[in-house]
Image: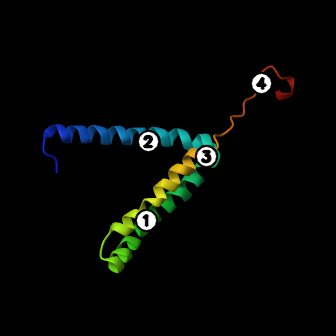
Amino acid sequence: MMSSPLQAITYGALLGLAGGMASITNAVIWPNYFGRKHLGSIRGIVTTAMVASAALGPWPFGVLFDITGTYTLAIILGLILPIMCAICAIAAIPPKIKTLKTDDPTNS
């Protein structure tokens, strides 16, 4: 619960900033890493996987709650995935940009 209007405004501003940065980052990173030729197909497959994961995500939380009586273990195990994703993002090899040399006679 927000105890003051300043907290609500700050939260809204930070949420908007984070959403905007995520949109800009997405628009730049996908084509830079995968190119533009098959970008629609790649994004389609990834979006399908994201929707399926979001739909199935509550299931392990519910099962672990039924087994343990608390969400603590599910949350701790759930933290592994974003940590692994962060490690993979940091370790990702940046794409090499292919440029054509205009003064090279073999490019004509």
For this rendering, which residue is in front, 2 or 13? 2
Identify which residue is drawn at 37% across, 41% down. 18
Residue 69 to residue 84: above or below: below
Q: Nearer the viewer, mark 2 or mark 1?
A: 1
**Earlier-in-chain disc, 4 versus 2:** 2
For mark 3, what is the residue? Answer: 92
For mark 4, what is the residue? Answer: 101
Identify which residue is drawn at 55% across, 47% down. 89
Question: Are the residues tagged 2 and 3 within 8 Å (C-beta)?
Answer: no
Q: Position of residue 88 (x, y in %)?
A: 57, 51
3D distance between C-alphas at marks 3 and 4: 27 Å
Q: Position of residue 19 (x, y in %)?
A: 37, 42
Identify which residue is drawn at 59% across, 53% down. 42
Q: Nearer the viewer, mark 4 or mark 1?
A: 1
Q: How is the image coloured?
A: rainbow
Left/right of residue 80 with respect to residue 94 in the rendered view: left
Q: Position of residue 11 (x, y in %)?
A: 25, 42
